[in-house]
Image (spheres, rainbow, N blue to C red):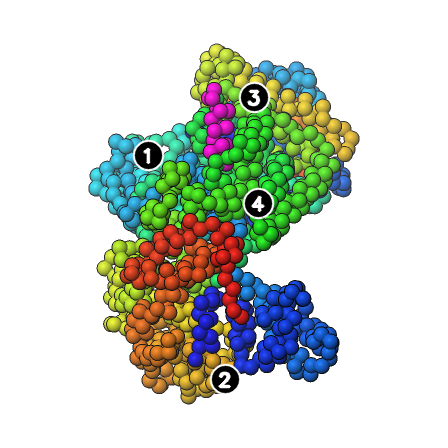
Amino acid sequence: MSRHRHAFNRRELLVRLGVSAAALPFVTNLPGVARAAGSPATAGRKRRMVIFFTPNGIVPKDFWPDAEGPLDKLKACLEPLTPFRDQILTLHGVCDKVRGDGDAHMRGMGCLLTGVELFPGNIQGGSDTPAGWAKGHSIDQEIKNHLQKDPSTRTRFGSLEFGVMVPERADTWTRMVYTGANKPVAPVDNPYQMFNKLYGQAKDRAAVASVLDGVSKDLKTLSGKLGSEDRRLLQEHAELVREMEKEIREQQAVEGGKAGHPVPQLEPGVRADNDQMPKLSRMQIDLMVASMMADFARVFSFQYTNSVGMARMRWLGITEGHHELSHEPDSNTGAMDKLVKINNWFSGEIAYFLKRLKETPEPGGPGSLLDNTLVVWTNELGKGSSHTLDDIPFVLMGGGLDFKMGRALKYKKVPHNRLMMALAHGFGNEVKSFGNPNFCGDGPLTGLRG
Amino acid sequence: MLPSRAAWLLTVVSLACFSNLVRSQAPLPSGEALYAKQCASCHGKGGEGTKRHPKPLAGDRSLAQLTKLIQETMPEGQPGSLSAGEAQAVSEHVYHSYYSPLARERNAPPRVDVVRLTVPQFRNAVADIVAGFRGYPGWSSERGLKGEYFKSRNYRKEDRVLERVDPVIDFDWGTAPPAQGIDAKQFAVRHRGSIRPPVTGEYQFVVRTEHATRLFVNDTKKPVIDAWVKSGADTEYTGTVFLVGGRIYPIRLEMSKAKQGVDDSDKKEQKAKPAAPAMLHLEWVPPRGTRQVVPDHCLATNGSPEQLALGTPFPPDDRSLGWERGSSISKAWYQAVIQSTVEVSAWVRERVDEMAGTKPDAGDRKAKLRAFCKSFAERAWRRPLEPSEEKFLLDTVYGSQPDPEVGVQRLVLATLQSPAFLYQCVGNTEGPRAVAERLAWTLWDSIPDNELVKAAAENRLGSPDQIRKQAERMLADPRGQAKLMGFFRHWLRLDQASDLAKDTKHFPDFNAELASSLRQSLELQVQEIVLGPKPDFRRLLTEDLILVDDRMAAFYGAALPPAQGFNPAPLDAGQRAGVLTHPYMLAALAYNAETSPIHRGVFIAKSLLGVAMRPPEAVAPLAPDLHPSLSNRERVILQTQPTACSTCHAIINPLGFALEGFDAVGKPRTSDRGKPIFTAGEYLTRDGKAVAFPGPRELGSFLAQSPEAHDAFIQHLFHHLVQQPERAFGRSVPDELRTAFQSDLFDIRKLAAAIATRTAPATRQVATNPANSERKSP
């Protein structure tokens, strides 16, 4: 990577937030921050949703439970999630039926959360016609918009898009979140950048506060060297410095009282490097948990690499890239074992996340974060070697939408648009359709609540 | 005829100040006589006090309050002996001559004030601190961008079939290939070079193409437009970037007519398809401007390093004296400073390894970053650090942070918020470093560059010759050019937010695009004189040719220019006389349908001849419909007949009448409402000579030769460059500069160098030393 990417670009952040520097006074919060964590829970409990993405399909026989009904033993791909068995709902038979331009990886990614076709474009995949971006917004953004409309569910960011080792390349394979047609959102895969997005303002204030004392001294020294007429400007200046000190102190007192959670400490200097993926994954998960505690957002997405992701999981003893392995036929048992290991590692990361959620009490309410969060783990393909968009992996976890967990469900090739609708309905956003309406005729997916 | 012969020395724009001067010289303030007779023995001749009554006559009572006080308490021993009228007269005299804050300010000797950096200085200084580490950009003589044409979809060197300079990027290739040896079905084009925005602000860039494209402006890694993924039917992409006027930024435009992702162009079915059409246009919407192809005069073929373009908005600087100066601070300013330093610190932090010449995992990183910090602070403060400062900044601010990047960030905050950065010349009050610093503010609105720092360290800034050599070098630098052009933009009011909208009934073809062309034409015309080989002041007022583009040629009926962009052409044979008759000026100094001899006359009198005037009475212009039989000239005369008006209008109107041969959009005309136009004008010079001019050419020649115009020009330029009162540098400065200007044959750049050379060695102590202070007699 040519640029050391640890720091973030402030202007970029401001643009991302839709605020220009002009509109952002240094002292005083962003809209919504002031009432972030300590806001009274008005309309019932908080509900959150997290969408985890991992690429290249799965190994069906080592992923899906054999039969419908209560979950007992989890297969090898899901094995690390065993402690949360009663919090898991697997949905087999949900299919991405969206067709049109683009190869399966592209549509798998671009239509996964949007449920709508890609525009014709210039991005050529390994087969099929070239395509561009998706024609509509993604379900997480739909739910975010719904929550942001209501002051009682509005948060500072609304949604946060995390990533781990997402290539610095904007194309149909690397973007799954869309705010609208042709409007993909880049996930933030740099934990330091994400940290600054979350805490940058407070950190900046602390940094400014730390230098003001020295500035006051400099002004005093300089004043002493000047005649009385020239001193006036410096005296006014010194007065402004004192005011700023006071304002920052007051601001920090307010924030300290509201945040109510420790700001996470990141290990410095972890670089965006394939072999650092395990570390980056945990840093990002910790930041996501902290964001929930601070109620920075209610909707999250978490994207590992990209569609056709090439991670080389050397820490598992696997030297081949994930995507090339995923093309191997079932008969290549060595490759299958590695793919199982890879998915097992991903579910281990999700298990870590669930553990953190379970251990963290819901701020201002009963239960844990896990009780109020729905986690959706998905993938752009049903299976890597066939590139099928049938039986897309959908594993639901946690109590956020009151689905009946601890079960394996099997559907008969239902369009995934209906699942998207069910997610929206779970947030009280009763959409009549989502994405391409032709796939929404039968309404939100049924059976989730038991 | 002139209200005051002495007044011409004053800066003219401070009208409030001037009106007092006028008043104090109005006929008979019997108050003055009364004061001399009854008050001076105790209060002193000039209100300065005497031994018995040492308190000077100064205070903040209003005129009415002061009058009451005098009436009730004065003179000593006989209070109440003055009649109401006498008390009023004495009070007025005292108030306007010594007592009021305004009078006191006027009477104070001019001095070099301590000033903070102006907003442009702040923006330039942070950019140049950074440029000191990454290199200063240059500006090649080749206008346009370097275009490379590739026969593949990528930029592989072996596929490059053509390299050439494209003055503008404005291509419609259709289904044809852009160059020989290229297959129209699949190719890639890349344009690289530098861009120099004329003014500071947000620039919206527009790229139009049917194919994959990316545009990088300044930031060489993050595109301002990224349409590499072609999606849907869009062929127009926009992106906005903040740029500082006059500075030079890298620009790169990429375009690829090909499918991206997997390359299947070798497949048979692909080869059989016909070529799709291709275009490539690079346009922009400058601040207050209209959308247009990015013009060649803003482009250069050389590469340049990425710059820090500070975008934090600031409140405007004080301009009450007619020039920008950092004479006041406010909370809004201070908050902008804080916000800016945060912006700069984040920018630096993100690039610090590259600037410090190290890498994230290098063993000597901490040491390299420490050296970077020291160098950063010394550039920002324009001097070496004292040992105690070094200890504080490097050991405490930087060194105490476990994460060196946080340390760098805090060091940037600490150095840029310090008065050592924010105020001019407070760390360097005398000696070669002070000379270097003052030269840099004067000629660049920025900090000294590496060469100036070196010259100061080697003691090469001692003699006027050495200083002048530096000044000449600096004026040839893009920053010097930017500062000079900034002056002309101000002087010709190109920086004022005038949209030049004209009455659509009278001038249906006059639109925003034409107005934008006019503005550019004038800027370029001035630029070619001022920055060109013959920067003679007189040419500004006498050149007959106007720079004309297609739009102007069509509107003004000139021959179509032979080449793209702006070309010199006679608009109407032998009628034009430099900037005064440039259609931009004529249109700007006019109403939307009618001409305004008054606006034109005021501009000539104030800006060109330096005549001071008090603000006009608030009178609405006579509506033309009320006097349909009168020409504009006749109506203006009628309106300004009252004595209250005619003192000034006797000067203004005859100057403005000389331009009546041009209508409200600057087109020539011979009649107005059916009456023939008279362009005869006149002016009474300060030495009492009546000058008559039959028309604009003679007016232009008169102004070009007029010592009054020279003095006014010198003074305007001085204030724009130095941002301090001219006479704070010594009573003789105006004379010295006038002599130099004459002997240099009115060379504008030599004048700027002379001003810088004259003022750079001065110290602030000069002005506070009583031997140099001057007291203007009231």
Circle 3 is placed at which residue position? A279
Percent x, y of residue A78: 61, 18
User: In what element is the residue under mark 4?
Assistant: helix
Circle 3 residues within 10 Å: few <14, some 14–19, many ≥20: some
**Mark 1 vs 2: CB contact within 8 A:** no
Residue under numbered circle 4: A225
Q: Residues within 10 Å of mark 4 (few under 14, many from 20)?
A: few
Label 4 to label 3: alpha-carbon separation: 54 Å
The alpha-carbon separation of the residues under discs 2 and 3 comes to 86 Å
Is A420 placed above or below A320 here? Answer: below
What residue is shown with label 1?
A: B154
Looking at the rendered image, the disc whose residue lies closer to the viewer, 1 or 4, is 4
Q: Is residue B369 magenta?
A: yes
Residue at which label 2 appears: B643
- Identify whether A153 is placed above or below B689: above
Name the kind of residue labelled 3 in the image.
Lys
Q: Quadrant of residue B272?
A: top left
- The span picked out in magenta is B362-377
Q: Nearer the viewer, mark 4 or mark 3?
A: 4
